[in-house]
Image (tube, rainbow, N blue to C red):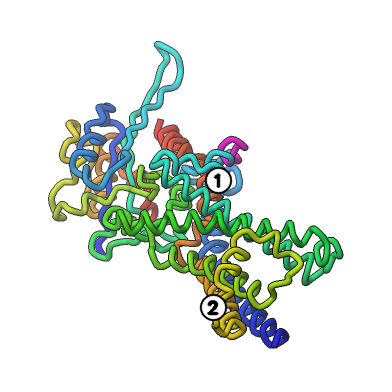
Amino acid sequence: MTMLKYTFLWMMILVSMGFFLVGVYKNIVSKIAHILWVNDPGPTGTTGRDTRVRLPFASKETIFREAIVQKRIENRSAFLWFRHLLIAFGFVSLFVVAQLYALFIKVYPIEYFVIGTGRGYLKFSLELTGLVLFVGLTLGLIHRIMYAEQEKTFVDLRLLLLLWFVVATGFMTEALRFIIEPHDAFIEYSFVAAPVARATAAFPWQWHTLHTIMWTTHAILIAFFFACIPFTKFVHIFVAPFGRSITMGQDTSRLKREKIAEGLL
Amino acid sequence: MSQYGFYFDKEKCVGCRACEVACQVWNGSNQTVKWRNVTTLTRGQFPEITGVNVSMACMHCGDAPCKKACPRQAISKSEETGAVTVDQSKCVGCMLCLWACPFGAPKMSTKGRMEKCNFCQERPMGIKRACEEICPTQAIVSGLIDELANFSKKNVADRLSYTEGGGVVLGHEGT
């Protein structure tokens, strides 16, 4: 059964990565290549009007302000900024910890992470980052539903729900696993899934079947989510920090206008 | 496809910024940042001083680089007028369009999405755009690009008394 599950998982990952890479090429790489070509001033001494600006490389302060702290969102609304930070940092750190978990436990097993305390720390980190993401997404959903009229233009409810279900099914899969494996050596590191498991274990349900269904649902949703990233508004995960840093929070606009004016002087 | 655009005459512009105001007044309901900007540039020291005022908005380029740069296909070009506009429901505010635009026209709005001149899309074609209508020196002229190119050539010819050169409408070079 385990072999079958992981074969299914890897097939899903391959299909998802295929869509993801096609999307990244089509909607990110080719776009940036086009921009670089448009902005290339060409060799010195070429004829014709050169109105293009050689952009200075974004400063550390700009990258920190635009990509890390996302101050532009804070300018719009402190609550929006707060929940976006929860989602952004929750998502990125959950992704990183999940990769470390797969790397040290499945791909290149290291004893400290397979049977040692390291595994407990990784599980704790997974739950913590998952919870941060879940809280941010739930706040976003509540805000989207309460202020539907104002928000519906900008927030795609379906995408928010997709990510919310990815995280929710992740927690539920882990809780169901604790019900069918109540003596897991690392259960004490779980502060979300373990209490849920303890609270529901008494019900006379088919926990093994439910776990398989939930695990499969979680795997499909994750694969679908990653395939969606470059084709939906999720693409901002990659392009927004990059584009906002490189354009230096709109200073580029002024520099380009001044370059044109200088040409007309 | 018809292609409309702007012609700007730097010799006539006095930098009064009436075009900026008219643009904001006409497009007030859609606009949270300035779509048209007057850049005033001076060089040298008195009395050897030279300067220029340039009123600039989106040039609605024939082959708009911002449209090709958008990862969400949020920027489209009207078949009817050639106006390049942003669909804010698709935009994610990544600012790649600003990076691509040679004129720095797209701006980040206070809503976190890009905004730019929409060629006064609520005005019927055939009447002047808001910035053009208000300009006290007729430095801004809108119209079909072919007509503007001829208009520009004629202006250059009248001023310099020869008929070659000139006639370039920014964003539509080679038209």
Q: Is residue A3 left or right of residue A65?
A: right
Magenta segment boundaries in residue numbering: A57-63
Percent coordinates x, y for residue A65 in the rendering: 54, 38
Residue that lies at the very extreme toward the front in this rendered image: A202
Q: Is residue A256 magenta?
A: no
Mark 1 — on which chain does it sit? A
Q: Is residue B61 left or right of residue A208?
A: left
Location of the C terminus of chain A (image quadrant): top left
Residue in the foreground of this view, choosing between A64 and A57 = A64
* Above or below, comparing residue A121 to residue A222 in the picture: above
Q: Amino acid at mark 2?
A: Phe
Percent coordinates x, y for residue A213 in the rendering: 56, 82
Return the disc, 1 or 2, that comes first in the chain's sequence.
Answer: 1
Q: Is residue A134 left or right of residue A78?
A: right
Label 2 SS: loop
Label 1 SS: helix
Residue A67: mark: 1
Q: Amino acid at mark 1?
A: Ala
Task: Report how far apart the C-alphas of labels 1 and 2 lie in the structure.
Answer: 46 Å
Q: Is residue A61 magenta?
A: yes
- Number of marks drawn: 2
Percent coordinates x, y for residue B56 in the rendering: 33, 40
Residue A203: mark: 2
- Neighbourhood count class around disc 2 (C-alpha, 10 Å): few under 14, some 14–19, many 20 upward: few
Residue that lies at the very extreme toward the top in this rendered image: B47
* Above or below, comparing residue A196 to residue A70 in the picture: below
